Image (cartoon, helix red, strand yellow):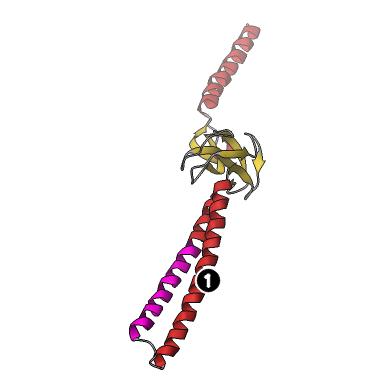
Amino acid sequence: MCAVRSCLLFGFICGCVMVNASPLLAQYEAPIAERAYQRIASGVVVPNRETVVSAKIVGRIQSIAHDEGVRVSQGEVLIKLEDAEWRADLQAAQASVALAAAELNYRRTQRARLQDLRQRKSISQDALDSAILAVSVAEANSSIARANVVRAEVVLKEAQILAPFDALIISKQTEVGEVTSPGAILMELQDQSLLILTPMGVYLY
């Protein structure tokens, strides 16, 4: 009987411990400082800069320096257009400048001579006025000739399409022999020296 009482007493004590222990474990919640979370961010990785390469003038493509996947440096020639006609235009414009300059010098000399004659009353004022007008026309023609040279130089420069910055050629959308049109995309470039993450959301686990 004593042994049975001892067992019952022992069981009662153990039962109290088990009953009391379970609620304590169920109600325990770790302090915020002790919690461990995993933060996962989703987003899109984009390059630092990207651009498209296009021609500003109409021309036939003579050469393409690189294919897709090649890195290029700023100022490097990517595409070259046939430029024989534009070089000829530049030479003609430069010759026009020389001709206009010669004409201007002659008209100025004539004006000076007629001014001297007018002072001596050897010619009429109308003759001097005509000489003065001829100088003004020659000066205007000289300015136009110089402007034509600048225009021809700009067009010739556009025959070479350069890389705007250090970049990777992502796509090439033209071939040698094709005729360009202003604004048509010829290449796509990306500057991948710095990749930027554009976040779409942040999740906690």
Residue at point 63%, 10% (across, down): 7
Percent coordinates x, y for residue 8 in the rendering: 59, 11
Residue at point 43%, 89% (across, down): 117
- Mark 1: which secondary structure? helix
Relative vertical location of residue 120 with respect to residue 166 in this rendering, above or below: below
Relative vertical location of residue 155 with respect to residue 101 in this rendering, above or below: above
Q: Which residues are magenta?
A: 125-147
Relative vertical location of residue 137 with respect to residue 115 in this rendering, above or below: above
As drawn, the residue found furthest toward the front would be: 122
- Decide which of 159, 93 is in the foreground and name it: 93
Q: How many marks?
A: 1
Characterize the local packing of mark 1: few (<14), some (14-19) or many (20 or more) Cα atoms within 10 angstroms. Answer: few
Amino acid type, residue under disc 1 in the picture: Ala
- Decide which of 55, 114 is in the foreground and name it: 114
Percent coordinates x, y for residue 26 in the rendering: 52, 24
Q: Is residue 130 magenta?
A: yes
Give the quarter of the figure containing the N terminus. Answer: top right
